[in-house]
Amino acid sequence: TQTDKMATSNPVEEMRPWITSLVISSIGMQRLDIVDTSIKSLYGDLKRKDAIEQLKPLIRDDSVTLKFVDSLYKKFQEVKTAHFQKSLGAAVKRSSEAVADGAPASKLRKSRFEQDGSTSEDILTNTMKMLEDRKRTVAALAAQQGMSLEQTDEKSKKAAELQARIQATLSAKPGLLSNVLQRVPGKPTPLLLDAEGRTIDKSGKKVPIPQRRPDLMANVKAMKKEHFEKASKKVTESAKDEDSPFYDQRLKPMMGQRNVRSFKFNEPGKFVKVAQAMRAKAQLEKLQSEIESTAKKTGISAATKLALITPNIDTVQSFVTEVEWWDSLILATGRYPNTESLTEGDFKGIGKLIEHPIPVYPSGEPNKPLSMQIYLTAEERKKLRKQRRREAELEKQEKIQLGLAEKPETKVKISNLMRVLKTEAVQDPTKVEAHVRAQMEERKRKHEETNLSRKLTKKQKRAKSIRKLTEDTSTGVHINVFRVHDLSNPSIKFKVDTNAQQLHLTGCLILNKELNLVVVEGGPKCLKKYRNLLLKRIKWAIDKKGHSTEKEGDEDRKTHKEYCQLVWEGTRQTRSFYNWSIKACKGEQQARDHLKKYSAEFYWDLALSQTIVEEED
């Protein structure tokens, strides 16, 4: 009927947000296709079974689908009942207001029932039938959902009370429904708006207008993006609020506008000043070059550089201590006494007994005396080996005779097969040959396993090679200092660096445009190999591509010593460096300060002084 259509059209649209939240709570995500299918099933008045069949392929879980449909139809019945009661109460209210205003019956709008030719008694009869149908529907729903009898009785009581209240209202005012305002034919229903332009009804309440929501995934993503941008804009605006407790006064707001570039005119005379400064700089450089050339000719520059390196001897010799450190231990007063009147009180720790101090060996000599190693000739080594093997064999035979060891199996080979086995080899030669070959394979396997057990692993091989290269430097450390003319070739620099690491040497390589210094510390054997590498093996006169930089007929060819030279070699009690490193220094002072950290700055002074003298020569 028309009444049922009015009751079921609006409730479905009102339930859309609730259905969306039900889908999210049941499945865990928003699915617009499930929401649309549920609304279509409610519009079409489908049964529960039909709705379950339509939603099963979308939800893909029977238990979740059943719970979802039960909750959906239960909520739909509740909303439908509430909407019907609301519409009926609104109709009664409108008719009562029209009668109270005293409007003539001709101007009153007729109700839907009067337009159809129905009387008030027919309306009451139809209302009673609708309430009875509603009651039966609620009872059926309660039976399907397993509701208790108490809940069903409560709902039936509420329906009876509602029916009695409607009947009492109609009986008290018999002309209530007939006095409803009649709609003017040919004209639409008047549209009522409030001050903000929203649609309202006669009572002043806001009329909810259903909004269409996008179904396509692309439209849904666009809508979500728009909502996110609005929310982020609100957050940024709230963050920029100076009254907010989270606003930081130290931060300056970043403007999104591009700075407008304006013309900047140079002041008159600017480039004239720059040109004058450049000319003055060029004249100063020219003057300096002339002074340097003159100083080189006269030898003043070399003397100046050597004076800077050489320490001031006068300041060192002018300082004389009052008491030497070896005398301060026995002097009681801390000063030298008068030699004319010496007493026992002037000294401490000196008596009548003779003190024998503990001897201290020099730093370069070992603490234990060295013994001369004896080497045997080849004949003597063979003789000792025979004696050792004979004694081991005799000891083995004695153990077998005493029963302490089992007799070893006879060693049979293909060559001595007939001699050892004799008659057994004649009776079944195939079996005996297989047995002999099995013995031979067993002996070979044991031999290979013994060799594998003695074979060193990778770690053991590495440790052995390191042990062979590492020398004992407890008695003294040997030091070599080299001066290299040019280390711009990366292959040569790689050889210098890698060989020092492989020989386990300590020291450093100083790279400087004036001087390249190599300082290495280690044992005598490793230093001999490294010295041979720098002074003999490396070809210094080659470029990066491997070609020689000198021509065959060139008379000014440099010798090997002019490329790399041994500046100093000697020994020291302890190491100055703890590892090998490479340091690139821009100036002479930086290189000297780096070596000063290891108390080895005199290596740089020595190499630099030799370089200066060679340049002058």
Image (cartoon, rainbow, N blue to C red):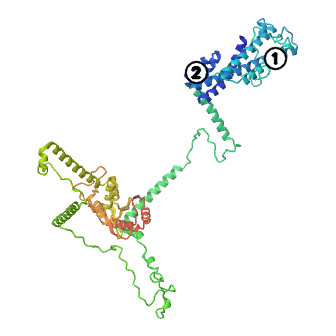
**Residue 55, disc:** 2
Residue 597 in the image: state x and y as whole percent.
Answer: 44, 65
Q: Quadrant of residue 63?
A: top right
Residue 17 in the image: state x and y as whole percent.
Answer: 66, 25
Q: Quadrant of residue 19?
A: top right
Secondary structure at badge 1 equals helix
Residue displayed at 62% across by 25% down: 67
Give the Cα distance between marks 2 and 1: 40 Å
The kind of residue tagged 1 is Ala
The kind of residue tagged 2 is Leu
How many residues crowd around disc 1 within 10 Å: few (fewer than 14), some, or many (20 or more)?
Answer: few
Residue 469 in the image: state x and y as whole percent.
Answer: 31, 61
Tell me if I can see residue 210 in this picture: no
Residue, far bottom: 340
Relative to 279, is 523 on the left or the right? Answer: left
**Lower position in the chain sequence, tag 2 or tag 1:** 2
The nearer-to-camera label among 2 and 1 is: 1
Tell me if I can see residue 186 in this picture: yes
Q: Nearer the viewer, residue 469 or 134?
A: 134
Residue designated by label 1 = 164
Residue displayed at 81% across by 16% down: 166
Q: Nearer the viewer, residue 306 or 77?
A: 77
Q: State which quarter of the image contains the C terminus.
A: bottom left
